[in-house]
Amino acid sequence: MGPLMQGVLTILIGVFGCVGYFYFSNLVLDRLIFPARNDDAGRNINRANAVRPWLFLAPALFALCLYLVYPVVGSFWRSMYDRSGDVFVGMQNYKNLSVDPEFRSAVFNNFLWVLIVPAMATFLGLVIAQLTDKLKWGGIAKSLIFMPMAISFVGASLIWKFVYSNDPNIGMLNAIRIFFGADSPIDPLQVPFWNNVFLMVILIWIQTGFAMVILSAALRGIPEETIEAAILDGANPFQIFFKIQVPQIMGTILVVWTTITILVLKVFDIVYTMTGGNFGTQILPSYMMEYMFRDDGRATAVALVIMVLVLPVMIWNIAQARKEMR
Amino acid sequence: MENIAGHKSALTWVTRITVLILVVLWLIPTVGLFVSSFRDRDDISASPWWQAPFPAEQTFGTRVAGEAVQEGGAFVLTGSIYEGSDAQVGAKVVAFGISRSDPTGITAGESVDLKGGGTLTVNGDGTFEMRTPEAPSAKGQRVYFAAAVPPEFTTGNYERVLYSNGMAQAFINTFTVTIPSTVIPILIAAFAAYALAWMEFPGRGFLIAGIVGLLVVPLQLALVPLLRLHNDIGIGQSFVGIWLAHTGFGLPLAIYLLRNYMVGLPKDIIEGAKVDGATDFQIFTRIVLPLSFPALASFAIFQFLWTWNDLLVAKVFLPSDSESWVMTRKIADDLLGSRGGDWGILATAAFVSIAVPIAVFFLMQRYLVRGLLAGSVK
């Protein structure tokens, strides 16, 4: 049986299994366990309604626990064991990490990524959102800048290989350098420190569209009167933008910022495809992939480090969600 | 805002030009890939893609030989220099030469003295005239020439990528991974989202907060323990494994998006149906599910793009043999490594892999934007 047939079968099993489960479990609950008959009818309906939410939630909760909650514990547990997974080594994997110069450089680079990518993407997104808002063809412009969102990180990396190639007949960057009088092409991905920035440009290129779409909606949600009042008071466009509009959408800017920050901590594809972590461009997710399959103890320890870095944002998100629900 | 204030300033023009520059900047890399994918391998290394519409200069080598005509004490050989060389007839000769060390020293139309006496003239249109005191040898005279080759666009790269590079298999594999991974989580999530939106039970707020938290759990954590689990229960590295993994990883976003949307549905309809005696199951399937179509579509697009573009999960949960590679893996681990220099193949493979998501993106942009907004702004 080919994977394709298997796929069709899985879809059928998945869809009909789901519908069947929900239908029959409801039926069993209402007819067999708590039937609304005899003297207990009222009490049984109440009881059934108390159980029903859990019927609706059960498959999702099971999958979430298995695929997202259990791994947090499982990874932590695994990170306490050595390469083979048989010998308990306690915190040894973490100690090894802390003295590995490559890990330190990965942490440093990741810090740069977290500092630069969300800031640049949000800033560019905000500026483009504001500029395109007044244009007739703004919709098309936005759509084109948004497009890289649909492209895979691997595809985007390849696209940028055509910009960064050290052959001036292929790499645009080198062609421009030579046009302005440089004598020999360089490999941008091997220039220390700046190669990190060149890699970040790829992610900024992808994420600006995301920031732009959300911030553009937020800008439109600003009450017109505040802007009109500012104009009547003689504010210039820059003052209106920075003193009236931006403060009003600060909440949304923060959401965009944190969302991109989380993404930056997880993306390994760009570094993996462009440099393989060489030339001092290693970041945590790609560092982890280097040890995946070879030394799972160390790989899970790195994953836990990433988790710890994500934790503050997670807590902030939950706090926000709770505030909204009230 | 300029209009409200009653004057149109130069700022409008600055805005227009800035946006135009930004759009061009954003598009250039993708356009480069697209153009390159239609160019011949030799063209790609001969001239940059932004010069693709213009003729590119290439150097060729050939030998001229044939029956010479005797003409007043000299042997004259005429013909076209393109015969016996790789250059097409449309090319325009710019310069030529007769030694390897200086292949393009003489401008087209001028003459050069040959070693054994006599002269050779090559014209811009490719015709040549060789005058020698003796009959030219059968071996012929070595001639090099630089010609401006008119741009040629070909679909040859696509044929090579699709028919002989295993990319077709990778394309099918990507589809095989993507479709079940998109369809299965939707239903599971929809029921859960309904319960979280419209049913009252203790612990509901806690569960919603939990799902918001799970939204940002790094996938990296899940890889090692889950692969081990899959191996223990006999799924191993397989398509079934990756479908389950993608389903699990996609659920938090699915539940979150759908719940946010369902909460906003009009209360009257749902309460009215309850009063009329409809069960929760009926309300869900007959009212809430059809009304939530936009949110379902948003999530479906997200999940589709995410699974199609994913490399990490495919690397870990699919078998490592090339038969089950998806396109991202094929490009990252195979084409970039072994064919690092074949830019035509690389560009084409990349374009094949991004064509479907881009088509989905432009067709369904409305739903994508709506989903993004529901997920981040409230």
Image: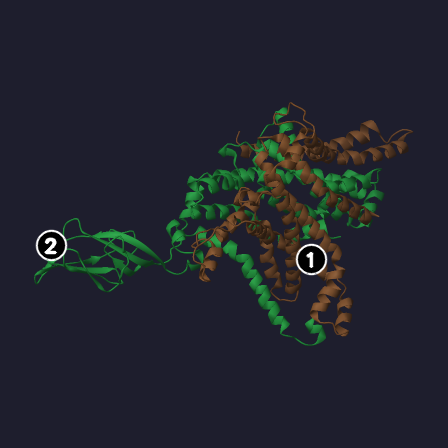
* Chain that the image shows in brown: A
- Vertical comparison of A33 with B187: above or below: above
| Residue at mark 1 | A215
Q: Nearer the viewer, residue A212 or A189?
A: A189
Q: Residue at x 13, y 56 (%)?
A: B68
- Please tell me in which quadrant of the rendered image residue A315 appears: top right
Residue at image mark 2: B135
Residue at image point 82% right, 48% down: A323
- Most distant residue in the top direction: A86
Mark 1 belongs to chain: A
Judging by colour alone, the chain drawn in green in this rendered image is: B
- Marks 1/2: CA–CA distance: 80 Å
Looking at the image, residue A183 sits to the left or right of residue A207; the answer is: left
Dot 1: few (<14), some (14–19), or many (≥20) neighbours within 10 Å? many
Whole-percent x, y for residue B259 in the image = 75, 45
| Amino acid found under the numbered disc labelled 1 | Leu
Nearer to us of marks 1 and 2 is 2
Coloring applied to the structure? by chain
Q: Secondary structure at mark 1?
A: helix
